[in-house]
Amino acid sequence: MCSNATYDIVIIGNYTKDTIISPSGTRHVDGGGFNYGAHVASMMGLKAAAVTRLSQEDVRVVDALTRLGVTVYPTYTSHSTDMSLYYPTSDVDERVISVTHTAGAFTPDQVRGLESRAFLINSSIRGEVDLAVIRELRTKNALLAADVQGFIRIIGAEGALMYDGWPEKREVLSQIDILKTDAVEAERLTGKTDMEAAAQILAGYGPKEIVLTHSQGVLVFADGQFHEAPFCPQKLVGRSGRGDTCIASYVCKRLSASPQEATIWAAAVTSLKMEAEGPIERKASEVEELIARAYAASAG
């Protein structure tokens, strides 16, 4: 990587070729946290870059982001990360994920030349982003955020994605400014079913802010205070990518707003995203309208 460009946000993660199977049928969606997040940054008018790994046959994803004004730094590999997401019932939080191929691991060279106000590590599976990459990012004068899923999920028997212990938890979390987790992951990491208690424990490892998503909304713990906002989609179609969209929305908004404002913004963006499959394709003005209509009390 040999670019000295400066961005508002750089998002790092493998592209995932998602096959979504549910009672309503089977769909194929271009996924990956970097993809969901880059769409958010573009919608918000930020100068964004995406660092990703994928097969050349999936270059359409790179082209689509480029058309949105996102600078993409791709590494082409023999396979993209192929992921199957099976929803056996109408409960969108009940799902089974499996992986058949991965696009491999990032290296420090892939981020060394990049400068940004914020970096978001949005990987899917342990091993994509290791401590060497995190240490390289930590040398930069930037906000560093990460989604915990890319550190505690591993590929188990027959390709099933499963949770595992996290030997490097203390070392990684000590270097992260904003940590995103969901309620299930938070319980696995802390042993606490109470989300506020879990968030406080995770903050004790070093992150200044914890962004915790759950089926009903988002809970943020920042500066010793909790902020919360519900999801309010008019219809629930696109569950996959919910957390990726939420953390990208939060980090992007935190560049110019308080934790409370960023919490509401993230909940609203994520609500609109969940009304359709794939990354968000709405306008910032629609987010503002939703906030004025549905979050006025929270904003006040």
Image (cartoon, rainbow, N blue to C red):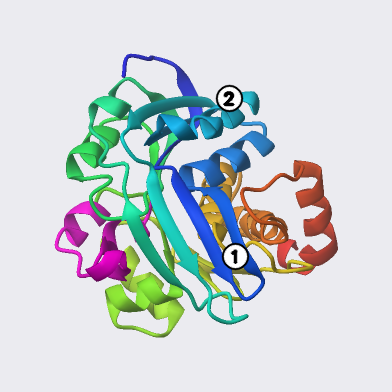
Q: Is residue 49 left or right of residue 168?
A: right
The first of marks 1 and 2 along the sequence is 2
Instruction: List the residue tagged with mark 2.
Output: 66
Residue at 81 percent across and 49 percent down: it is 286
Q: Is residue 18 left or right of residue 202?
A: right
Within the image, what quadrant is residue 141 found in? Answer: top left
Instruction: Give the spatial CA distance, label 1 vs label 2.
Output: 25 Å
The quadrant in which the N terminus is found is: top left
Residue 208 percent across, percent down from the top left:
38, 55
The amino acid sitting under disc 1 is Arg
Within the image, what quadrant is residue 296 found in? Answer: bottom right
Instruction: List the residue tagged with mark 1.
Output: 239
Contact (Cβ within 8 Å) of mark 1 with mark 2: no
Residue at 62 percent across and 80 percent down: it is 90
In this view of the protein, which residue sits in the foreground, 251 or 40? Answer: 40
What secondary structure is marked by label 2? helix
What secondary structure is marked by label 1? loop
In this view of the protein, which residue sits in the foreground, 248 or 60? Answer: 60
- Residue 44 showing in the rendered view: no
Residue 150 percent across, percent down from the top left:
33, 55
Residue 159 percent across, percent down from the top left:
29, 64
Residue 176 covered by magenta stretch: no
Q: Is residue 240 left or right of residue 148?
A: right
Q: Which residues are magenta?
A: 146-173
Residue 147 covered by magenta stretch: yes
